Amino acid sequence: MQRSRADLGSMTQRQPSLYIPHGGGPCFFMDDPAGTWTGMETFLKELPGRLPEPPRAILIVSGHWESEGFLFGAHPRPELIFDYYGFPPHTYQLSWPAPGDPALAERAAGLLRAAGYATGTDPDRGIDHGVFVPLKVAFPDADVPVVEMSLDQGLDPMLAWSAGRALRPLRDEGVLILGAGMSFHNLPAYRRPQASEPSIAFDDWLADAIAEPEGRGERLAGWVNAPAARFAHPREEHLLPLMVAAGASKGPGRRVYGEMVMDTMISGFEFA
């Protein structure tokens, strides 16, 4: 007998939503003698253990896909998009054959459409490295269906947060909602010791801003007024996945990963 979504919801535990770092290019699949990425890799490997149960599917918004309105990848077998440059040849031969979930893509688009947002599905879209690199670490068996969500090209933080709010019901249907980016993303500033202090100041502001659900959307919408905001994010596409993950929660948020990477503070956040 086929079960309804309501039946499925009653059988599953609510998944959290998270904002995770995706690293630098294919960093986890290269030699790393300095251990630059060891701590981040460990956090990603341990991510499934943070969940109340294995997710039915993953909905992940990447800082590497922008579109007019919000789109959801709806290919049943999405290919990998190697959208990084100048890395060793073997990193362009990686595989991670996780299935897509066209029904989930349609369900997510329907939730946004009902809330009044421009949205749709893309049946041809593959998954970019902001998705497959961290998820290949966290879910190496590639046995959880994955749907990638784009950012609206206007990069409006409140719009991203509101889209996450519209997607909240999915968490009760066994869907893990992830935002993938980097909490500090200023490429010329990496490996510069003078970047450390301002990156910490911005990261501490983020941790405070996401902690309490009351007024969280408004606080995050004003992120440009945070300490060192435009130094941390000259362009905000790697921060806005955090807004989606935060909007998908009515509960408290907290930092669950944080360390200095290339002289800058990088964090991950979880929302109940």
Image (spheres, grey):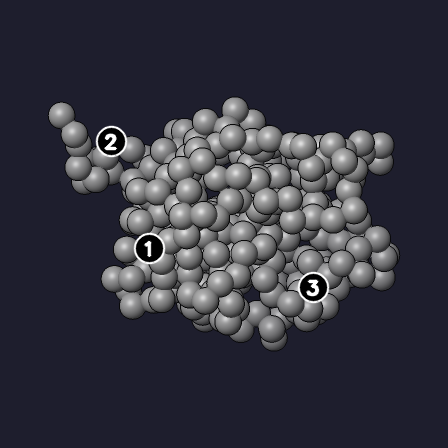
How many discs appear? Answer: 3
Between 168 and 149, the residue placed more toward the observer is 149
Mark 1 or mark 2, which has the lower sequence index? 2
Local packing at callout 2 (Cα closer than 10 Å; few below 14, some 14-19, many 20+) is few
- Look at 48% across and 32% down and name the residue there: 98
State the SS at label 3: helix
Local packing at callout 3 (Cα closer than 10 Å; few below 14, some 14-19, many 20+) is many
Local packing at callout 1 (Cα closer than 10 Å; few below 14, some 14-19, many 20+) is many
Q: Amino acid at mark 2?
A: Met
Residue 1 appears anywhere in the view: yes
Residue at label 3? Answer: 232
- Look at 57% across and 70% down and name the residue there: 223
Q: For marks 1 and 3, give the one nearer the viewer.
A: 1
60 w.r.t. 210: above or below: above
State the SS at label 1: helix
- Look at 69% across and 64% down and name the residue there: 232
Q: Where is residue 107 drawn, in percent x and y?
A: 29, 49
Spatial CA distance of label 2 from label 3 is 42 Å
Q: Is residue 20 left or right of residue 7?
A: right
Q: Quadrant of residue 228?
A: bottom right
Residue at label 1? Answer: 109
- Look at 70% across and 45% down and name the residue there: 25
Q: Quadrant of residue 257?
A: top right
Residue at label 2? Answer: 11
Spatial CA distance of label 1 from label 3 is 31 Å
